[in-house]
Amino acid sequence: MAKTAVVTGAGSGIGRAVARALLEDGYQVALAGRRASALEETAEGFENALAVPTDVADEQAVEALFAAVRDRWGRLDLLFNNAGIAAGGTVAELSVEDWKRTVDVNLTGMFLCARQAVRLMKDQDPRGGRIVNNGSISAHAPRPASVAYTATKHAVTGLTRSISLDGRAWNVACGQIDIGNAATEMTERMAAGIPQADGRILAEPTFDVRHVADAVRYMAGLPLEANVQFLTVTATTMPFIGRG
């Protein structure tokens, strides 16, 4: 029987790359994201894809997403909890509205999706499944003027650890992938230069997003008695380790 997955933020970037990799591997994949047209582009050419327009910050929309998976396939084996936004701004400048929206999507949205996934996984037969949360390099260290994004990504690490612990009772494994400078639409600006901690504007290296998809494939392919708790994949020379 084919395995089933939900990928959030599946309309572009890392989410699209991972979703298409899973589809190529024979997974039945529910593609979640806010733009129906983008989800249809991700699903193009795959009969085993289900596009479900979803705002992950909307509790009812998330419930409808996982109900659609249950009704269509009867079970869930994998959640790639990936949807996120990046509102720029320092602690002195960021608006409360931008702070709240970032928390709503990056943290509450991940919680809502994980909650529904675990509820489905713990009640299905055979019981269990896997959740992979997208943390980011910002779960380790901030960029300048990224207070909301960094705070939410640090919080995702706590969410991952809590789900991993709570999930033991139901054979649910949870791990986190922290990604730095994968080449997507979001990182195109890095070639022109982005602010560094010392005030300089420098171009940064990127790496092929397919390597992220391969890493998630590895994490997802393990038996449930094994888990990659945390995995970091970056462009080798990006300014992260040491002084850059």
Image (cartoon, grey):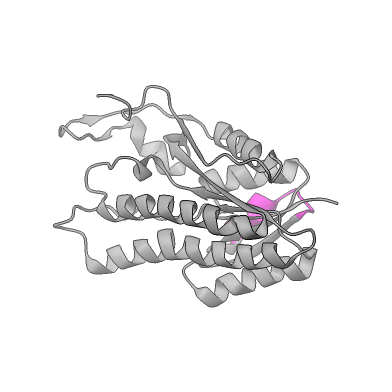
Residue 83 coordinates in the image, percent (x, y): 49, 55
The image shows residue 194 at horizontal and vertical percentages of 27, 36
Query: Is residue 225 toward the left or the right of residue 8 in the image?
Result: right
The residue most toward the bottom is: 60
In the image as oriented, which residue stretches furthest toward the right?
Answer: 1
Furthest residue in direction front, as rendered: 169
Q: Quadrant of residue 226?
A: top right
Image coordinates of residue 237 in percent, x first then y, are 37, 22
Q: State the extent of the magenta-drawn residues as a range.
A: 37-48
Give the left or right position of residue 180, taking residue 144 as reference.
right
Of residues 222 and 106, the one nearer the viewer is 222
Determine whether 125 is above or below 235 in the image.
below
Q: Nearer the viewer, residue 126 or 56?
A: 126
Q: Residue at 78% across / 45% down in the picture?
A: 26
Image quadrant for the C terminus?
top left
Residue 29 magenta-highlighted: no
Determine whether 6 is above or below 191 in the image. Answer: below
Residue 77 is situated, as x and y percent measured from the top left of the image, at 71, 54
Q: Which residue: 38% across, 26% down? A: 205
Instruction: Report the residue at 71% width, 42% height from top.
Output: 223
Q: Which quadrant of the view contains residue 138?
A: top left
Q: Residue at x 48, y 52 (%)?
A: 160
Q: How many marks?
A: 0
Name the side, left or right, on which 232 lies relative to 152. Answer: right
Residue 215, relative to residue 80: is it above or below? above
Task: Name the side, left or right, on which 1 lies relative to 141.
Answer: right
